[in-house]
Amino acid sequence: MKCVLNVICAVAIVACFGCDPNKSSNSSSPNQAPQTTTIDSTQNTPYEAPKLLDKSIHKGKLDPERASDVRKTFDEFKRAIGRYDGKTASAMLARESLDYYANILETLKLKVFQPDNYKALEDRIPTSVRTNVDIMAQRLSPQFIAQATPIKLYETAFDQGWIGYQSMQSASIDDLQLYDRDGQEYVLADFLTSGSFRDKLWARIGFYHQGDSWKIDLVPIFITVQKSIDDFISQNFYHPDASIEGTVRETVESSNPGQWRRFVYKKDGFAAKFPRVPLYSEDSGWRIYTSMHHLFGQFDVRVRDYDDDQSQLYTSPDMRKSYIYGNLSAIDAQSIRCRDLADGEVKIVMCNFDVTQKSSTGKTIWYFTPNNVYLLLNIAPTASYSEDSAVAFAEGFEI
């Protein structure tokens, strides 16, 4: 099934988070289940459906001054997501957003560590939640799931660009309404993106006044997505299992290097395929385009014009070798293995290396032109490094 709804795809974006599958803070076995209580089919599911405005009293439209504060909070949240800054974005979330993912996490643990119990209960779990849980079960290692916390999952999702990166680029809020929600000040606003009118999907986003600041409540977005999926399945006579299977399959396929997007940077004279929108930075004369993949690590294209004393890099093999080894040594690379790939108008050198103190493996490809040098870099934890992905990244690069 196609990702028939941008809504359904949004579920994968909103809650399909992951991490380096080997990343862990302790030495427990990857297949060791956490301490859980056996659940029988007569019990409630660990997932509890949230309610949007229970225990709420409408107080009217938010006054302009406070509305400005809420908009500033939202804009800061957008910027953090745009920078893949998971720590900042997660710190801006309300407790209720964390509570929602705590329920999701318990459902995920049930699926991974008590599959028979999960099977007995899954018909009572909303389709959107089951979709998220199935995607997480594929993307996350059992070891990570056993140790995960809601805020760690959010941080990882924001870092990887899986929550809201695309939708947040065009997002805005409108019609800010104030509520008293069980003794807390609460603002509910329209959440609009470039696809809202096209998809006829009007989502809401909430803001709690907690402490001395406004905190983001993503639960209204989750509720909207969940309802839209249920309505779509009902109206189009889809079986929920088919919807889940199709969405999970498309989400997994989208992480394949063959599905990466091509980006063109005319100013620096190159095009490349990245796993997600790259971030730009500058360091020591390098212009750096960086993109991260949750499994296959960091992918960079770096460009640098020659300094006056580097013009011989184009003509001297010995200078190129010294330059390459010097740069790789600066990142503690060891077991460096290099070979020339081309010696024509563009000189190309490929190097494989290890960074043993960080348990990482990498590949670089250097392109020396008459005026500058291009560096392609892929580095990942050794256990998840993929030679095929590194080669695919190189094949997608053009000067």
Image (cartoon, rainbow, N blue to C red):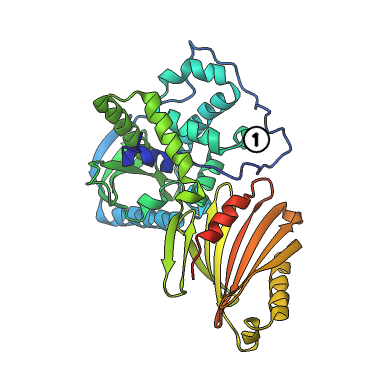
Along the line of sight, which residue is nearer the eye, 252 or 17? 252
Residue 312 position within the rendered picture, expressed as x and y whole percent measured from the top left: 65, 85
The residue positioned 62% from the left and 81% from the top of the image is 314
Amino acid on which the number 1 mark rests in the picture? Gln
Label 1 environment density (alpha carbons within 10 Å; few <14, some 14–19, many ≥20): many
Q: From this viewpoint, which residue is outermost toward the bottom?
A: 308
Which residue is the site of mark 1?
A: 143
Residue 50: which quarter of the image?
top left
Which of the 4 image quarters holds residue 362? bottom right
> Residue 339 location in percent, x, y?
70, 67
Closer to the camera in the image, 104 or 278: 278
Residue 94: image x %, image y %? 44, 42
Image point 32% across, 32% down: which residue? Answer: 229
Q: Is residue 354 visible?
A: yes
Question: 141 or 215: nearer the eye?
Answer: 141
Tell which residue pokes out farthest to the top in this image: 42
The foreground one among 28 and 175 is 28
Does 180 sit above or below residue 84?
above
Q: Position of residue 360 (x, y in %)?
A: 69, 53
The residue drawn where x is 43% and y is 62% is 263
Look at the image and tell me whether residue 44 can be seen: no
Quadrant that contains the N terminus = top left
Secondary structure state at the residue bearing disc 1: helix
294 left or right of 92 in image: right
Q: How many marks?
A: 1
323 lies left or right of 133: right
